[in-house]
Each structure stands twice: as C-alpha cells, then as structure tokens.
Image: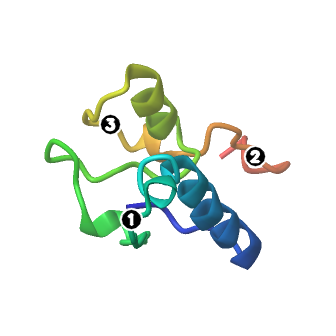
C-alpha cells in the first residue's frame, strides 16, 4: 500500500521503477507479471494496532527513524516544519 501519489507523472514513475526492479526476476526469465499499487486511505489501516500518523508529521518521522509503529501524541500529529503566522503564536 502507498500513501496518495501526487500526480500522474509520479504514479507512472513508481510503476515503471517497480517494473525495472523486478525485471531480473520475472521479465528477464520470460515470465508474465502484473503489478498493482493500492492507495488505501491511511485512516483505514493500521500497523501493530496503530493508525499511521499524518504525512510529514513528527510522529511519521519518528516511525521512519525507529523503523517501527508506535503510539503517538496529538502534538506529534503536527507537521515537522510547522510555521505559525504572526498572531497565532501568541494564542
């Protein structure tokens, strides 16, 4: 499964890249093959009982660094590069 791939060019790049990676194991050996990429909404799947954190969030970065799913706080759902506009930081 994958998160949403933004745009047709990136979608095509992923499919062609996967085909290139598996070619030595299937195409080059004369086998037929099929590839399917599924974009299930991240709030409809879980890892180790945890719903994946939002894309580019603090929690997602921690999951990648630790290479495992774990619980996370509401604050960790925020983007890594959160920029507050003037006036919002004072509230």
Residue 77, position in %: x, y? Answer: 46, 46
Which residue in the structure is indicated by mark 2? 84
Q: Quadrant of the N terminus?
A: bottom left
The residue sitting at 53% across, 52% down in the picture is: 55
Which residue in the structure is indicated by mark 1? 31
Image position of 6 with respect to 8: above or below: above
Nearer the N terminus, badge 2 or badge 1?
A: 1
Q: Residues within 10 Å of mark 1 (few under 14, many from 20)?
A: few
Nearer the N terminus, badge 3 or badge 1?
A: 1
Colouring scheme, one of rainbow, by chain, secondary structure, one colour: rainbow
Q: Report the side of 45 relative to 36 (left or right).
A: left
Q: Secondary structure at mark 3?
A: loop
Q: Secondary structure at mark 1?
A: loop
Residue 32, position in %: x, y? Answer: 39, 71
Which residue in the structure is indicated by mark 3? 72
Quadrant of res 79: top right
Quadrant of res 29: bottom left
**Front residue of 17 and 37:** 17
Residue extending farthest to the left is 49
């Amino acid at each position: 499964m994958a998160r949403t791939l933004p745009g047709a060019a990136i979608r095509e790049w992923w499919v062609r890249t996967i085909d290139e990676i598996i070619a030595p194991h299937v195409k080059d050996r004369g086998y037929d093959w099929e590839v399917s990429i599924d974009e299930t909404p991240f709030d409809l799947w879980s890892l180790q009982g945890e719903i994946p954190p939002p894309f580019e969030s603090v929690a997602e970065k921690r999951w990648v660094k630790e290479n495992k799913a774990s619980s996370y706080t509401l604050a960790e759902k925020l983007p890594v590069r959160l920029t507050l506009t003037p006036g919002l930081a004072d509230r």
